[in-house]
Structure formats: structure tokens, C-alpha cells
Amino acid sequence: MKNTILIGVFLLLSNCTMKPQNDKEFQELNKHKGTENYEVVELCDKKSEIETPILFDKQNKNIIVKAYKKQPLGKRGLYHTKRITNLGESIEVLDNSYRILKDGTIWGGDFYINWIINGNSTKQRNIDPFSNKEIKNTYKYEINEKDPQKWLLKFKELYAKSQYIYIYI
């Protein structure tokens, strides 16, 4: 049954002529000037590639766009995240942004930023779960607690309290 429906849809579409009657009537969005009822706005400059998905902040009614700007050979590309109103007006840009988690946290491995959530672009460091002290460099972090049973208990405690879990493998 499903195959018959798909073939039927394909036959209907293949018999249609998709060419518009008037070429001026339809334009690519980036070439369209808009009308009195709407305006076409670029979310990022033409040198940037937008990463998908584009996010929508329901609480503040903003669009969050993460983009990548290619650099000359031998240089690292630049990522930036842009906050845009639902009318297309740019509010602010966070340069050198990293992975965006489901709850809006920007995560950079050894730090995180809550810029999308509360506008704070300060890098926050991870916390040692036993001493509650800031870990300055996650990659050179020395573990003081060696007992695996204590680690398992602490993990279960923090896991139960957490609102959102992100697993990075």
C-alpha cells in the first residue's frame, strides 16, 4: 500500500510543470527586495555558513543562530552565535562560541557560558564535586578523591539533583 501511494505521488509530481508563468513573480529569497508586507533579512553575512538547527528561545522570543566563518588556509575557522529578535533585528553576537546544549548553555569543554539563558558571557569553570572549588584547567585536573565508591555515590547524588544531563563521548 505504501509503495503504491509513493509511486502515485511521484507520477503526479513528474507530470507537473514547475516553471512559473512569469519569472519575475518568483525569486530566490536572497535576491528578493521584499514588499510592503514583509522584508527579507540576512541572518549572517555572506562569508558565514549557518549551522543547523537554528534555535528559537521561546521565553525571550529570540532566534539563536550559530555560524561558522571560514578563514584562510592554515588558520582556524571562527564560530559565533548571534541572538536575533523574531523580527530579524540583531541584538548581540558572542564570538568564539562553542557547542550549544539543549538548555541553552554554551559548552566549551573546560568551561561553560550562560549567554543564551541570561546574557552573561563570562566563562564559568567546572566545579570539583568533592571540594566545591573551581577547576582552573579541566585537562590538567588532579583527582584528590581516589575511592570509586565515593565517586559513584557523588555521581548518583548529583545525577538525581540535575535538571538536564548532557553526555559527551
Image (spheres, helix red, strand yellow):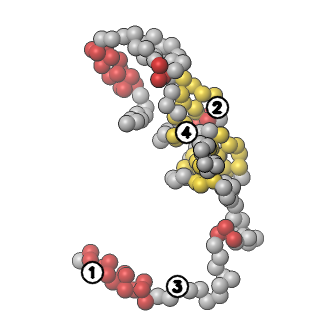
Disc 4 marks a residue whose amino acid type is Tyr
> For mark 3, what is the residue?
18
Disc 3 marks a residue whose amino acid type is Met
Could you say which is closer to the camera, residue 142 or residue 50? 142
Classify 10 Å Cα crowding around label 4: few (below 14), some (14-19), many (20 and above).
some
Tag 3, which secondary structure?
loop
Q: CA distance from mark 3 to mark 2?
A: 49 Å
Instruction: Decide which of tag 2 and tag 1 comes sooner along the chain.
Output: 1
Which numbered mark, 4 or 1, is in the foreground of this view?
4
Classify 10 Å Cα crowding around label 2: few (below 14), some (14-19), many (20 and above).
few
Instruction: Decide which of tag 4 and tag 1 comes sooner along the chain.
Output: 1
Instruction: Decide which of tag 3 and tag 4 comes sooner along the chain.
Output: 3
Q: Is residue 77 above or below residue 47?
A: above
Q: CA distance from mark 3 to mark 1?
A: 23 Å
Residue at 65% over, 87% down: 22
In percent of width and height, residue 123 lies at 60, 27
Which numbered mark, 3 or 1, is in the foreground of this view?
3
Residue at 43% over, 17% down: 129
